[in-house]
Every structure is written in structure tokens, then in C-alpha cells.
Image: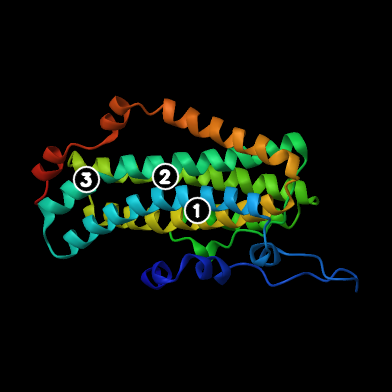
Amino acid sequence: MAELVRNVPHALWILLYSPTRGVRVLGRKQLPSVLDDWCAWLPQQKAQVFAGYVLELEITYNMFSVALNEALELRQTRMLTQSYRAASMTPALCDRLSGHLSAVLRALSEHAKHYGTIPNTAPLDPENFQGPKEQRTARMSALLSRVLLTQRSQFLHKMNTLAEMTGDIGKGFQLAVDNLANGASIRPDMDWQVMDHAHYDINTCLREAIVLLKSFVRVLPDDQLGVFQKAVRAQMRAYDSSNTPGGARSELVSARRMASVGGE
């Protein structure tokens, strides 16, 4: 199932778990849904802003995904030394993805709090996650979304949940690679599975964020577009400044150390 979903084009992947079109309330006209927002046309300036953020996030994700898939494929073919060496390059790429994704989520949340711009949102679906912790978090978030009375509280709760999940996935991925690197892993196969689940789950978080971003940009007043862009840039710079080349290099697990335990 995981491989099937990865091969589905991203737009269709999103629509697979988006809610149905519109919701009828007390017999009145249907209210717009997240799916309506996703299918809606955006003015040129908004469309360019949205497409720019999506492209940046997709590039970052693809760099991580390609590197991790290479490591997983090498392991499947029993080329263990090469698989550990390839895996050593993935934590920094995962960290960059989670950092940039969290930056966009924080900018969305802060703008909503300050300006009151609140888009449509839909509960997280635990079936769209593979890690046990992420499934529990999504299940709890879905339950809470049913008791949160306002659209604002539902949106902010989902932003906070996605940001927290993104950070936790990145930390869990780093820990799994570290366990393999220093020989502390009791069950290497389980650590590889953690890495594979993290790949799937951070992709889910990314797709959820893109859907939310489209809904947000759609309702964002034109005179707030520049303010939002500045907020995203500030959040991105804050992440980049905390990850200097030296710091990023220190997060890479030594390929030599990985190779030394390649016999697994």
C-alpha cells in the first residue's frame, strides 16, 4: 500500500483523503469544503505564491526521498556497506525538509492568530500514517476536532499538530540512523522500518500542509499576501541560520562509521 500511494501523482494523492465536496447545514446551501478550495481557481499573484512554496517544498522532499530510497534499495539487494553509506546522507536532508515544512506551518499559524484569516480544514486521518505514534496523534487530533467549536480553533489545532508531528518524525528518523551508525541497534530491521515509516509520514504531513496552504491562500485578503510572504521568509531564515554548514555537517552520520557496522 505504501508503494502504491508513493506512485500516485501528488494532486491525486491529496484528493484521496480530502473530504467530500461541500457540507449541507440545516438544509441550507452547501458550505465550501477543503476539496472545493483545492479545485478552486486562484488569481495570478496568489497562484504564483502558492506554486512557489509548493515547488520549494517538493524539491526539498524529493532530495530526501531519492536519497532514502537509494539506501533502502541497496539494503534490499544486500549491499549493506553501500546502504549504510547512503543512509548517512539522509538525516540532514530530512532535517531540512522538516525545518522548511515547520517554517511554513508556523507562518500560517501566526498569521491566522494575528489577522484572523482562517481557512477551511479537515481532520487528520490516522489511516494516512504508518508510524504508531503518528497514528495515535492523528486519531487524537481527529477526536479533538469534533469537540472544538470554532473553525479557528480547529485550524490552529491542526497546524500545531502537524508542526509537532513533523518535528517528532525528524527526530525519530535521526535516532534510527544514529542507532545503526554506532552499532547500538538491537534490531536493525526495526530501525530501517522506522526510517521507511518516517518517509511515508513526513510525506503525509507535507501533503496536508499543501492542502491547507491552498485553502489559506484562497481566503487570504490581497493586502495581506505580502505580509504573509515576509512571515514565511522570516521563519525560513530562522531555520537556515540555526543550521550553518558546520552544524549541518555535524548532523551527517559518518559514512566511515556506518560502513564499519555494515555487516549488520
* Amino acid under disc 3: Leu
| Image point (38%, 29%), residue name | 243
Identify the residue under disc 1: 206
Q: Nearer the viewer, mark 3 or mark 2?
A: 2
Q: Position of residue 7 (x, y in %)?
A: 39, 70
Q: Position of residue 167 (x, y in %)?
A: 47, 41
Q: Secondary structure at mark 3?
A: helix
Q: Relative to 263, does residue 6 appear above or below in the rendering? A: below
Q: Position of residue 79 (x, y in %)?
A: 11, 58
Mark 1 and mark 3: span between their CA atoms? 26 Å
Considering depth in this image, is 114 or 165 the residue closer to the camera? 114
| Image point (73%, 58%), residue name | 146
Mark 3 and mark 2: span between their CA atoms? 21 Å
Report if the CB atoms under discs 1 and 2 are less than 8 Å apart. yes
Q: Relative to 261, does residue 11 appear above or below in the rendering? A: below
Which badge, 1 or 3, is on the more N-terminal residue? 3
Mark 1 and mark 2: span between their CA atoms? 9 Å
Q: Which mark is residue 97?
A: 2
For label 1, the crowd category at 10 Å Cα-Cα, with few meaning under 14, some 14 to 19 and many 20 or more, is many
Identify the residue under disc 3: 180
